[in-house]
Image (spheres, helix red, strand yellow):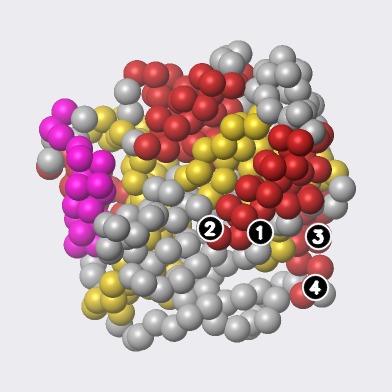
Amino acid sequence: MKKFINDPEALTSEMLEGLALAYPEKIKIESEKLVCRVKPKAEDKVAVLTLGGSGHEPALQGWTGEGMVDLSVVGDVFAAPGPPKVFEAMKMLKRDAGILLVTLNHAGDVMSAEMAKQMAEAEGILVKEVLTNEEIRPNPDEEGRGLGGCFIVYKIAGAASEKGMNLDEVYRVASKANENMAAIAVLSEIATHPSTGGDCGDMGKGEMEICAGQHGEGGGVRMPMMTSSETAALLGEKVIAALELREGDEILLVINGSGKTTLMEQLITFRDASKFFASRGIQVVRGEAGEFLTVQEAGGYQMIACKFDAELRELWDAPCDTPYYRVR
């Protein structure tokens, strides 16, 4: 393993220190692992809170800022933060307008969020939660995990809050985005854990895996490597089925590189996916290609789509200003 790091035990703290030094006008670090907006949101507006392990940069802390997340609770590499830290964040954000908590559907994150919500309720802190579970699984009876689609939910929820919507309304539009979203991951190369150098699984030469999860957790479908257009069509078919898309529908399309896949490959993939959806009469009205939620040097990408209506499109287009995403 060749990485420009120092002490493997200090990866998360040093990364957060670097983030704050790089973007001092946007974020600050409180209590070691709480990433906060430099300029807090007005108390009469709903706060947007999230949590998750580090190692997925720019997610999740890279989207803290005006128009998106107010506070991100950061765990160690690939590990959920503990409930006390999440509860601490809730106390910091306590307000009459309430808090929207966005949690990715992974066991550790869900457990921490649930315990923190119980503590918050005892303290009279108003919290509503959206659980992102947009992943397409090989077995439709399996619940989806939360992948890079959280990026979309943060943007919609943050914009709704900035508009002055109350907690019920912010929850409604965030849930609408979540329920109209689907994501599927394709993995071509396994990541390594940056602290230990150990592989996070195995992958045969000349193979790829669809429905691979975020960390290559397994349970997906292995097959021979395909071209970009072949892979985009395979994944696009599953997205259409999951969202029950029809001719005339409009979508936001995000191609999220997993860490090792180059921007050239991501853009070729975006081209091929756009052409595939157009061939089915589905219009890509908004799009992004880049690295939004990564897993170190994992090869592959996530295809993420959200069915848009006028309300979601307006919220998506609203201004935001975070370290790794900005809309003017």
Q: Residues within 10 Å of mark 1 (few under 14, many from 20)?
A: many
User: Which one is earlier in the sequence, the residue at label 3 or at label 2?
Assistant: 3
* Amino acid tagged 1: Ala
Residue, far right: 31
- Mark 4 or 2: in front is 2
Residue occupied by mark 3: 13
Residue in the picture at 39% in, 48% down? 134
Res 268 label: none
Say whether residue 80 is left or right of residue 238. right
Say whether residue 184 is left or right of residue 279. right
Q: Residues within 10 Å of mark 2 (few under 14, many from 20)?
A: some
Residue in the picture at 59% in, 21% down? 167
* Amino acid tagged 3: Ser
- Mark 3 or 1: in front is 1
Distance between mark 1 and mark 4 Cα atoms: 16 Å
Residue occupied by mark 1: 80
Residue occupied by mark 4: 9
